Amino acid sequence: MSRRSFYPLPYLLTTSGPGLAWIALFVVLGVYSLFAISLGTPDPILLTPTPAWSPLDWSFANFRDVISGLNPSGGIFWEVFRRSFVYIVLAAAGCVLIGYPVAYYVAMYAKRSKALLLVLLILPFLVSYMLRMLAWVGLLSPDGYVNEALSRLHLVSQPQDWLGGRPSTVVLALIYGWVPYFILPLYAALERLDRRYLEASADLGAGRVRTFIFTTLPLSVPGILAGLVLIALPMFGDYYTNQLVSGAATTSMIGNTINTYIASTQQRAIGAALASTLLIFLIAVLAYYVRTTARAARAVVR
């Protein structure tokens, strides 16, 4: 590609300048403020965190406390991180098991009903996430419709306390809340799938099952990964889902722990350091995903 095919620098600055300024103001500055609080020292009198805006004033004491708390042998944060990881893996697996058949059917087989199905998939985005979780709080309450239906079917002898700190309730709530965000990118990937590969597989004698296993599924892996990244990263910081459907310390996730420390004036610096550590971890995961997908794309081009 010649140099003349690129847009001139003034044009790029004019078109992308406002967006870059917005990102710099509300993202970069916000992240730097988070790290400034994490690397600051508490006020000796009020014991409130004092941000360290200059790198010369940085103190890594809060990060050392967080790292020591992540020690598997007795660290105060280790159990929370382990529990969060287990919940998120189970919720992500549930989103794949539920979302893949839906996205596959809409992309491959839905004809006249495709527009209606897409509207139904987009509808959850028009309702507040918290309102959808509050609806489940009403359904899962001791006198809610779930216990009533189970009692009428004689599946339970007495109302179950679904909101009393059950890990299964938290995992199912995470699946319900985030599965729409997994379906849409996967549907987009399946919709863009080159149908000639499927026709070639059929011409070579492969049936529908073998075509799906050896052709469709491998080609849809980028869409699956995109959907998993889109739902897994926010799950690490999600605290209101667990708080609404459980609220028990035995099911507390990393987002709940960060929220607890941030709400405490004297422990706010530890909460900021914990959030900064989580942010670094998620950036590393996202960088690995971007690198892997870029490498796969270059391999396809070649």
Image (tube, rainbow, N blue to C red):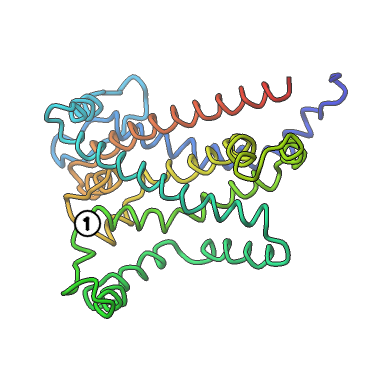
Q: Quadrant of residue 213?
A: top right
Vertical placement of residue 280 versus 272, above or below: above
Who is closer to the viewer here, 184 or 257? 184
Q: How many marks?
A: 1
The amino acid sitting under disc 1 is Arg
Label 1 neighbour load within 10 Å: few <14, some 14-19, many 20+: some
Who is closer to the viewer here, 290 or 37? 290
At which x and y percent is residue 147?
26, 74
At which x and y percent is residue 186?
58, 46
At which x and y percent is residue 108?
67, 52
Vertical placement of residue 200 versus 126, above or below: above
**Quadrant assignment for the N terminus:** top right
Left or right of 223 on screen, residue 237? left
At which x and y percent is residue 174?
37, 54
Vertical placement of residue 255 versus 244, above or below: above
Residue under numbered circle 1: 166
Q: Residue at x 28, y 61 (%)?
A: 245
Q: Residue at x 59, y 47 (%)?
A: 185
Q: Quadrant of residue 258?
A: top left
**Quadrant assignment for the C terminus:** top right
Left or right of 52 on screen, residue 113? right
Vertical placement of residue 188 versus 196, above or below: below
Q: Residue at x 79, y 34 (%)?
A: 11
Q: Residue at x 60, y 51 (%)?
A: 104
